[in-house]
Amino acid sequence: MTTDRFHRRLRAFTLVELLVVIAIIGTLVGLLLPAVQSAREAARRCSCLNNTTQLGLALHNHEFHTGHFPAGVTNPNGPIRNEAVGQHVSWTVHVLPYMEQNSLFRMFDQQAGAYAEINDKLRRSNIAVLRCPSSSGPRGGDQSDASPIGWSSYVGCHNSVEAPIDVGNDGLLFLNSRIRFDDILDGSSHTLLVSEHVFDEPDPNNGVSPIELGWPSGTRATLRNTGRKIEQFPMQRITGLAVDEPAEKGPLFVGGFGAYHPGVAVAGMGDGSTRGLSFTIDREVLQAIGSRAGGELPNAEW
């Protein structure tokens, strides 16, 4: 009887053994977490890729039905200032019928302008295809209504260098533009159409925040250029990567592209293809794909 009790006591865990098991489990969880996060980010990037593809298809359907890409921004005059003053109807408004948003398009009064009171309720609408799942939102929150104004993670390319949004830009979407495929002399597969951007910190010297302007606004809220390196949030925000960027930003400053994905920004090209643009892409190559007729030779390496 005594021997049986002794053997039964030996089957229990000691405190040291329990601590060892807990340490092993903690180590395994620590090893698995990066893999889980990587898998989740891969799914988010796939969703972002799908959003960019849908926007590219919408822009191409617009071109098919009208004979030209939509204007990057519709306004009586330029250059466009980052202020809630003017018509400023963005390209995103023009492609609403091609994104299954016909009712929103019919109710939007383009003549009144993006900031008109009659369009205020529509301006607050959140469109899922305009939001990258990896984006933390304009105020660092979730994908819910962190901002009262509907915002977009995706912006069109208006120019190859930093310059105000105006009629003389060399991209595909700019002030009152009507670009046809025949105008893309560099080749549509080598010309950037849309990509992502990161949300800037509020800057009182740079006009109204893109978050407050919203997706209907044809300002830097929906248009950017290839005049600076692609920004990676949150690391490479301001590390000397700027190209042709003014020392003091103002209401005419537009800025470049960026992304919340590790390594790449998802981009839609003029031919409808979608690809990733590396944060380390050569500056000259990036500027070359920002222009529609710059005469640069195609670079297979990018």
Image (cartoon, grey):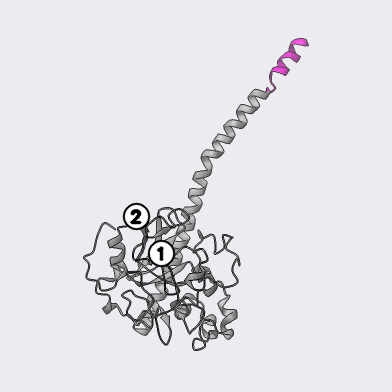
User: For the residue marked with disc 2, what is the amino acid?
Assistant: Thr
Q: Is residue 56 left or right of residue 26?
A: left
Instruction: Using the image, tell me which numbered label, if any, was put on residue 257.
Output: 1
In percent of the image, x 40 and y 55: which residue is there? 239
Pointer 1 local density, CA inside 10 Å: few below 14, some 14–19, many at least 20: many
Q: Is residue 112 left or right of residue 276?
A: right
Write down the residue under mark 2. Answer: 280
User: Looking at the figure, which quarter contains the N terminus?
Assistant: top right
Q: Quadrant of residue 243?
A: bottom left
Q: Circle 1 sits in a helix, a strand or a loop, which is it?
A: loop
Q: Earlier in the sequence, mark 2 or mark 1?
A: 1
Q: Is residue 273 magenta?
A: no
Residue range corresponding to the magenta coloring: 1-14
User: Looking at the figure, which quarter contains the C terminus?
Assistant: bottom left
User: For the residue marked with disc 1, what is the amino acid?
Assistant: Phe
Q: Is residue 182 left or right of residue 17?
A: left
